[in-house]
Image (cartoon, rainbow, N blue to C red):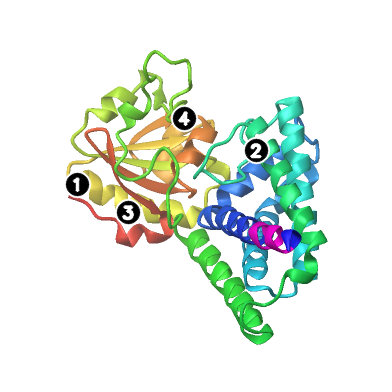
Amino acid sequence: MILKLLTHISRILVGLLFIYSGFVKLVDPIGSQYKFQEYFSEGVLNMEFLIPYTLPFSILLIVVELVLGVMLLVGYKPKLTVWSLFSLNLVFLFLTWYSYTYNKVTDCGCFGDALKLTPKETFYKNVVFMVFIVILIVGLKYIKPIISNKISAVTTYISVLLSLAVVYHVLNHLPIIDFRAYAIGTDIAEGMKYKDDSDEIPPIHDFMIETDDGDLLESMLAKEKAMLLLMYNFDKTEKEGITAIAKVAANAKAKGYEVYVLSASYIENLAATQKEFNLPYTFGFCDETALKTVIRANPGIVTVEKGIIVGKWNWTDADDVTLK
């Protein structure tokens, strides 16, 4: 009876954890892509040959994580589910142990940007949940479908389809829920302040508009209306996207917006580039990681009013940009 009770408790806890962990990453799979790029980089696991495959790998892992949580709760194929959870958590356990031991990746991204844990906290969280999963293995015979095998199967298939639909939407637009420090409604200046004389890094950092005339960030934050065109890597920016945002920028300029183009790339012949893409605006340098954090698009559009972010769009939604 005790094992049966522990199995049911573990089933609920592990199932809900994997669903939550999968969901907060599902709404922003590009964030997980960036995290795996960090793990596979030369300075960490030195597996750079895997970096081109990080997006499909991230999507697969996220969907599997969420669906396994659903399968555990509804009781679909319990043996496959439990051993898959064990294997997946073993991978997470290794990655978080590596981060904790060697201090290589200070945020594993286990809960996306929704919940930040230190490497130590994340590692011990996975240790605890490994204990719960071992209980599930021992009490496997007590894991039964909640209603019937057929309903459990249908529920599982629906969760797969819904997960893929969400991923498709997010990759073509922007994250459904923005957990990052640059969400709509954010006061950028406030986000850059250190709290209570603490040494803790503020949520917004490394954000700048560096030009030959210095950093224009403070000037931008004082503008009544400003538009930021963000291209974290100019060479990788979709040219169709540049055409789309150039049209929006022209409309914004006509309505009194100050327009800035931010990139982490060095542009050798700036004047020629501005003319070629019809972007006769202020070009500024900004840290690539900061730009990737601001918006999951390359290029992307952000509107700011008196330092507060009021709108964000992927270039694919350029026609939907609202201007005052």
Looking at the image, is mark 2 or mark 3 earlier in the sequence? 2
At horizontal 24% and vertical 51% (from top left) the residue drawn is 251
Give the quadrant of residue 148. bottom right
At horizontal 51% and vertical 30% (from top left) the residue drawn is 287
Q: Which residues are magenta?
A: 4-10
Task: Say few, some or many: other residues with alpha carbon within 10 Å of mark 4 (under 14 / 14 to 19 / 20 or more).
Answer: many
> Quick one: SS at disc 1?
helix
Residue 274 position within the rendered picture, expressed as x and y whole percent measured from the top left: 40, 39
Looking at the image, is mark 4 or mark 1 earlier in the sequence? 1
> Quick one: SS at disc 4?
loop
Q: Is residue 73 left or right of residue 2?
A: left
Question: The disc labelled 3 sits on which kind of residue?
Answer: Lys
Q: Which mark is residue 286?
A: 4
Question: The disc labelled 2 sits on which kind of residue?
Answer: Thr
Where does label 1 land, which residue?
254
At horizontal 54% and vertical 40% (from top left) the residue drawn is 233
Question: The disc labelled 1 sits on which kind of residue?
Answer: Ala
Where does label 2 land, which residue?
122
Looking at the image, is mark 3 or mark 1 earlier in the sequence? 3
Where does label 3 land, which residue?
247
